Image (cartoon, rainbow, N blue to C red):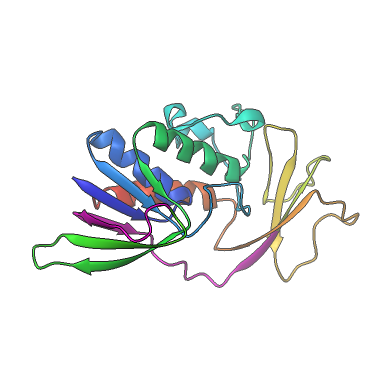
Amino acid sequence: MTVAIVGIELSQLVCAHTILDINPDVELHLISERAEAGLIGELPGLISQPLSNNIPNEWLGDLGSQIPTTSNTAVRRSWLEKALATKLVERGANLHLRTTINQNKSKSGETTITFAGAGYSSGSTLLVEKVITKPENTSSNHWRGGVHNEELTGSNYEGHRPDGLVEIWWPNQQEPPRSEGKWLQLMDWTGEDPLLSLEQEVELGRSLASTA
């Protein structure tokens, strides 16, 4: 069976690992316009329980300084995505980066994918039994985030990363929760709740896998 997953963000990466856990013989293709998995942009990495409760350690490549302990309440999400993608390649999945696709579904239910863009597969075609696409984000809630290396501030939307840095989020219309403004990184995200974002994306990924 050949399956194509459109996108290489957290939910799509979880979807891919879940599919391979169920059927290691699936020919799996992940397709994205992005130039690499993870390390570009930053989304909420807050966690309310040990990361291994949601993401098995065997799904992860090298996390470096982001290897979480049971006491951590956040993880750098871009590094997490990179580690998931690295392990997917080791498991035999195909990543098509800097790539877009056109789809043509046949009467028999199979889909012919035509690759375009700057990726290595541009101009080629692929016949797949299933194309998995993540639902669009319909939230209108805009959040801002920041990373700093001082003590936690007591916000409901903050967490301590394994490397000692603190990640914190606040609604866009509010003032930042720290007055000094000495941020190491500033971030933007649209969604319902940054405290639940990572775990909900993992849950979505597992749900998408069930459609394969």
Q: Residue at x 57, y 58 (%)?
A: 193
Pinpoint residue 22: horizontal percent, then vertical percent. Answer: 25, 36
Left or right of 209 in this view: 191? right
Left or right of 24 in this view: 93? right
Q: How many marks?
A: 0
Q: Is residue 201 above or below residue 116?
A: above
Q: Is residue 142 above or below residue 53?
A: below
* Magenta run includes residue 142: yes
Q: Which residues are magenta?
A: 120-144
Pinpoint residue 170: horizontal percent, then vertical percent. Answer: 70, 60
Q: Residue at x 42, y 45 (%)?
A: 13
Q: Residue 190's quadrant in the figure? A: bottom right
Nearer to the camera, 43 or 25: 25
* Magenta run includes residue 131: yes
Res. 43 visible in picture: yes
Where, quadrant-wise, is the N terminus in this rendering?
top left
Nearer to the camera, 195 or 18: 18
Q: Residue furthest left?
A: 108
Pinpoint residue 75: horizontal percent, then vertical percent. Answer: 62, 39
Q: Residue at x 49, y 46 (%)?
A: 199
Left or right of 21 in this view: 49? right
Nearer to the camera, 156 or 34: 34
Res. 203 visible in picture: no
Pinpoint residue 73: horizontal percent, then vertical percent. Answer: 63, 38
Q: Residue 64's quadrant in the figure? A: top right
Q: Residue at x 59, y 46 (%)?
A: 78
Q: Is residue 49 above or below residue 195?
A: above
